Image (cartoon, coloured by chain):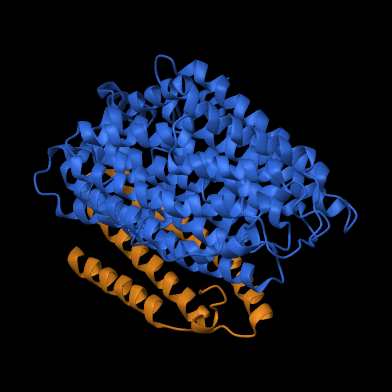
Amino acid sequence: MSPNLLALLPEIILTVGGVLIMVAEPCLTPGGSRKPLGWLAILATLAAGAASIFQLGFTKSAAIFAFYGTIQVDPFSIFFHLLIAAIVLCSLLGSLDYFEGATNHAGEYFALVLFGAVGMMFMTSATELLMVFVGLEISSISTYIMAGFRKGQATSAESAIKYFLLGSFATAFFLYGIALAFGATGSTSIHAIAAGLAGTSTPTLAIAALTLIIIGLGFKVSAAPFHVWTPDVYQGAPAPVVGLMSTAPKAAAFAVLLRITYSAFGSMEARWTILLWILAALSMTVGNLGALLQTNVKRMLAYSSIANAGYLLVAFTASADRGIAAAAFYTATYAAMNVGAFAVITQVGGFNESTRTLADYTGLALRRPVLGALLSFFLLSMIGIPFTGGFFGKFYVFTATIHSGNVWLAVVGLLNSGVACFYYLRLIAALYTRRETAETSPVTSISFPAGLGLAATALATLMLGVLPGQILHLAGRASWSITSPSAARIGAAAETASR
Amino acid sequence: MVPISYYLILAAVLFSIGVLSFLLKRNVVTVFMSIELMLNAVNLTFVAFAHRWQAVSPQAVSGQIFVFFVMVVAAAEAAVGLAIIISIFRTRQTLNIDQINLMKN
């Protein structure tokens, strides 16, 4: 197999799946069931995940370089490919019934999910900022549309317009950063930028470039102070879409941020560490304090995701070898518990999302014990209780930063975790409180695919907390493929050879 | 010949005008146009730098190629953005940002 084909195998499979769905969608009867298209999307995602595992076998000694060195498939990109495929799989399982009968052309949703995943995967394996930009836009444009997918609902349209405007605004900053990096080094390749910056002494242009890139990606991962869009967008968008867009695009954006900071701007580590230190402390504090004030559950989880972006940014202040592995592991745990929590919210609220506030959730666990127990489990993992993924995620991030001497940031993080206990426990307490008024809403049973998705996320959260060895090993390999001194040299060599 | 700094300053000014009008303008369409202005300021920066670096290495033409990608993506973004603007106008009968605030507590 040619290296170009091998390197893009998961993306090709997903694209073909998405195109097939788009072609099949108008051929089906209007208003008919779109579940077959959903299963097709699930099949394509499974195949893409299998393709990523297949690629892993080729990256034992060196990464796969394709398309003139612009695509680099290494354990780092494969880690995030597998993570994105898993998130998409669980989201698809959870949303198979969500749009059923509620909206026309639900098939487009499944295609958009696949196209978005293609963009995110491109972001993680691209070593050329042009490819990163194109991937970022493929994923963003797909998610803008998905956020507004409850057509006719004013809140959904409002969520889409806010996501769109702020997302495009952020992209412009990211692009300006790339333009200045190009001005500083004469190239937009991550390896060439690293080589170009290694010799310079006062890279004023490079500092401006890096700041603008961090602002742009800060918007995408909703780090404070670039988080203003998050609560409104998450509150208005359909619940299964929020589960997807609060995890997968963020994982991809964090992967890009890891590659750009540690690889392209590795020589300026001291400078960007300070910047990300501030962003991390701000995000944790703003996210957790903001969540305290919320009564809408989706809005509360939006603030919680801002706080989680903060915990993740803590990993960036650690040394490369520990920091990258801790960040990769934390994205995996965050994805498992967040996708799970939103899958429960999808099941509880249904398409109309009638169950919104803390008051609506009161007594839920008594009426629907399984859903209540699962939501409590995911919330406990977000607190960081031992034997859940959230515990190990926080543990590795904070130990990594303490090893680099950032004790104060770890203290801020731990204080924040204490504050976070309050609003998570408040929701859990509400779930198990008997409600005064009689319950009238009908209890619908959980469909098989949705149950499968819930079970998968719950199992993943548990496994990451009890037996994290396998994922940690993979995260370690991912980190090594960026930090090993040979990686950059081989990358630069492959690029010049291919020209 | 016009020195490169002129182009860069012009681009920086255009970008700043874009940022300011994004923050200050109240009509969704105008806000959207200010994003386009920011993107075009970036394009100008790319072309200016590409011209400068081409004296050093012919590979710097990639800066000009980047501009084409930005334009194509901006067009795709405009298609989706205008569709979302239409859907917001259908549900709310307004395009004023201050009145699109159903979700403030």
Tell me the quarter of the image containing the C terminus of chain A. top left
What x and y, as percent, mark residue A302? 49, 57
Please tell me which residue lies in front, A218 or A361.
Answer: A361
- State left or right for residue A263 relative to residue A293: left
Compared with residue B24, is residue A435 higher up or lower down, i.e. above or below? above
Q: Is residue A396 left or right of residue A265?
A: right
At x 53%, y 26%, the residue is: A463
Is residue B65 something that shows in the picture? no
Q: Which chain is the one coloured blue?
A: A
Residue ID at (50%, 20%): A56
Q: Quadrant of residue B103?
A: bottom right
Residue A82 drawn at (x, y percent): 54, 31
| In the rendered image, the vertical position of residue A277 relative to residue A336, given as above or below | below
Residue A96: % across, % down: 75, 46
Q: Residue at horizontal 51%, vertical 16%?
A: A57
Q: Is residue A387 visible?
A: yes
**Front position in the image: B70 or A204:** A204
Point 82% across, 57% down: residue: A442
Position of the N terminus of chain A, as image quadrant, is top right
Comparing A379 with A41, the one in front is A379
Q: Position of residue B96 (x, y in %)?
A: 52, 84
Quadrant in which residue A404 is drawn: top left
Q: Looking at the colours in the rendered structure, which chain would you say is drawn in orange?
A: B
